[in-house]
Amino acid sequence: MKPTKSLRVVFVALTVLLIMGSWNVTLAQVKLAQSGAQFLSVESDAKAGGMAGALTTVESNSASIFFNPAGMATMNPRIDVVASQNQWFADIAYNAFSAAFKPGSGAWGVFGLSFVSVDYGDIQGTQRWDNDLGYIDTEILKPTAFAAGFGYAKTLNDKFSVGTHLKYIGLNYGKSIFPDDAGSPDTVKSHLAFANAFDFGTIYKTGWKSLAFGMSVKNFSDEVVFEKEGFQLPLTFTLGISMDAFDLIRESIGQQKLLVSVDALHYRSHAEQIRIGLEYKPLDMLAFRGGYMSANDENDVSFGVGVQQFGLAFDYAYEPFGRLGDVQRMTVRFSL
């Protein structure tokens, strides 16, 4: 690549970063209770957790289906399977699974599956009652949620990839008992809601070093009706940029890698946010990760580590959540 063209690419990259930074400063605003099913905004993957979720342009095989489905398009193995567990605060447990299959040489694209389940723990149910307390205890409630999806990604040429992810979402918030003062039997209601949503994303490799740009739209759907009230899913628009910084000094640094990834996010129900993720690989089998995210009250930094060999990988991430406690994520990956 000619020097003038290289400088042009660097200039564009810096311009995008400045726009992303100013976007966060000028557009930040308070947004509260404007969407439901917030479990869709929580990352279970440990690699993402260690890098503050800044994975929009980071190709992660089948796990990309959760961040930017276009990232599946260029995966090298024919089969990739990922299982993750996220020990969230307040005894909330997230479990995530993804799988991707590349038939043949990949000319037909890459097909993926995803599943996320959430267990909110046990909650004591109550019912209004005419006693000193004004209520009595009823059954133990076990609220849960899930999202199951199908994804597809394809490279349109050697620089541009696209992907989509269709999801079916279910919410189960247990049962409620509605007493009838007129003497009729009490009414028991099951609080269930279901919705369809889809994600879409693109990744563009500039051809200069490993510099890449990308964008994604997640949780696009119609209004979800729960009982008599409606709400929107946590729609999120993301712009991302990433590069192996050691590409600039490759001759003197050897095979070490330092991936730098920056995402700018626009939420329906959260202030605009910048996420920065770092991944340092002294060896191809070992990775140290760190991340920072802006506009959060309790959590802003994260740390992680990963090891991989012979197609098997294990990732761990730790994220302090201030007064809410600590969050730990663990992920196992297998590629064939």
Image: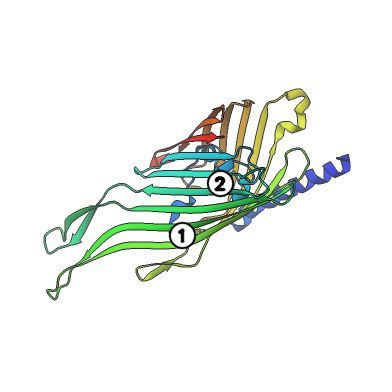
Residue nearest the viewer, comparing 52 with 217: 217
Residue nearest the viewer, comparing 35 with 14: 35
In three-dimensional space, the C-alpha distance between marks 2 and 1, rounded to whole angstroms, equals 17 Å
Position of residue 142 in the picture relative to residue 45 (left or right): left
Residue nearest the viewer, comparing 299 with 262: 262
Label 2 sits on what residue type? Answer: Ser
Residue nearest the viewer, comparing 156 with 321: 156
- Circle 2 sits on which residue? 294
Where is residue 308 drawn, in percent x and y? 55, 28
Residue 211 vertical position relative to residue 20 in the rendered view, above or below: above
Q: Residue at x 28, y 62 (%)?
A: 190
Label 1 sits on what residue type? Answer: Leu
Label 2 vs 1, first from the N-terminus? 1
Within 10 angstroms of label 1, few (less than 14), some, or many (20 or more) residues?
A: few
Q: Residue at x 40, y 48 (%)?
A: 117
- Circle 1 sits on which residue? 32
Where is residue 145 drawn, in percent x and y? 38, 53
